[in-house]
Image (tube, grey):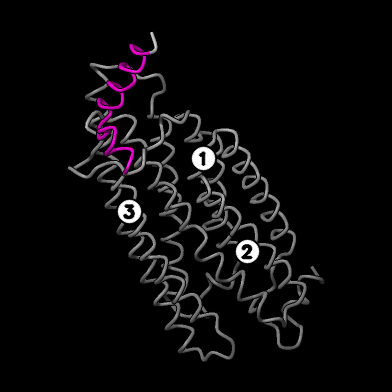
Amino acid sequence: MAQSCDALTAPNTQWNFCPNIAAAYLFLVLFAITTITHVFQAIFYKKAYCWVIIISGLAQTICYIFRVLSIKNPAVFGDYAAWFILILIAPLFTNAFVYMVMGRMVWNYISAAKIFRITAWRLGTLFVVLDVFAFIIQVYGAASASGNNQTTAQVLKGLHIYMGGVGIQQAFILLFFVFAFKFHRTYLAESRHTTTANSPLPLLYTLYTVLILITIRIIFRLCEYSQGLNSKIPNHEAFQYCLDSLPMFLALVLLNIIHPGRVMAGKESNIPGRKERKSKQLYTKTDRESLGENLQVLSA
């Protein structure tokens, strides 16, 4: 405990409470393990789009590297600012990955390859763009709040901007749930007449759970500074570990267990690029299946 409390008593310390270095080391290791697993899974399943979830895990791993460094060097502003910003923005990549996976699920499991008249390749792109919009706001707010020699008013202004970005992120998540539920209903209706090799339902339930975990984190972040810098929540790190880092770690682990590359395996499950879709007239699941049947006939 004495070593941890040095972070609070050191001259020019950046800390307002006594951080637990053992907990920081623990989550550093946990995030590193799940991130390395995601790297191997992306290579094994040959899914290039998995770089997004790898970035999420890597950012959260680096976050805890800087947190450990900041605890050991409490007067160094750069280390403190790095972990502070990374822990706020890293989960957005997990959110974006969920959107990308849903677009691929629509392509692979819905005959028309669209939901609410939005095609599979545009669905994922649309929500990723919205996620980037929330990301920019959150980065700006977090960077403003973590600036050196900031007044309390300036820090609070930055945090309020960040909280606005978090609120926008949650609004997009709620909108996404509408599309996810529509996918769910459409798939169940179509599956009565057709069969698929791998059911998307385990992956869909995983995405639901991941979004719920992200929502828990968002609610925590909205409450964290709602009463100012001196409220109980930001000055007790147990809240951060239980309501931010733990949910985000569980989200990464769930996507390790039910990996999209295992459910939607093979190159044929990838959404073709614009040129390929146009040249081969691949706009629906039926088009893709017809092309496969024609190729089998020609090869025979």
Identify which residue is drawn at 43% across, 34% down.
203
Quadrant of image for the N terminus: bottom right
Looking at the image, is mark 1 or mark 2 earlier in the sequence? 2
Foreground pick, 156 / 144? 144
Q: CB atoms at circles 1 and 2 under 8 Å apart?
A: no
x and y percentages locating residue 283 in the rendered image: 25, 35
Expressed as whole percent of the image width and height from the top left, the position of residue 255 reads: 51, 40
On whether residue 110 falls in the magenta region, the answer is no
- Quarter the C terminus occupies: top left
Front tag of 2 and 3: 3
Residue found 34% across the figure and 59% down from its top: 129
Q: Where are the magenta residues, as a range? A: 275-298
Expressed as whole percent of the image width and height from the top left, the position of residue 254 reads: 52, 39
Counting other residues with Cα less than 10 Å from the Cα at mark 3, is it few (<14), some (14-19), or many (20 or more)?
many
Q: Earlier in the sequence, mark 2 or mark 3?
A: 2
Q: Which residue is mark 3?
A: 127
Front residue of this view, candidates 275 and 161: 275
Residue nearest the observer in this picture, 279 or 158: 279
Left or right: where 286 falls relative to 205: left
Q: What's the residue type where badge 2 is placed?
A: Cys
Marks 1 and 3 sit apart, C-alpha to C-alpha, by: 19 Å
Q: Which mark is residue 63?
A: 2
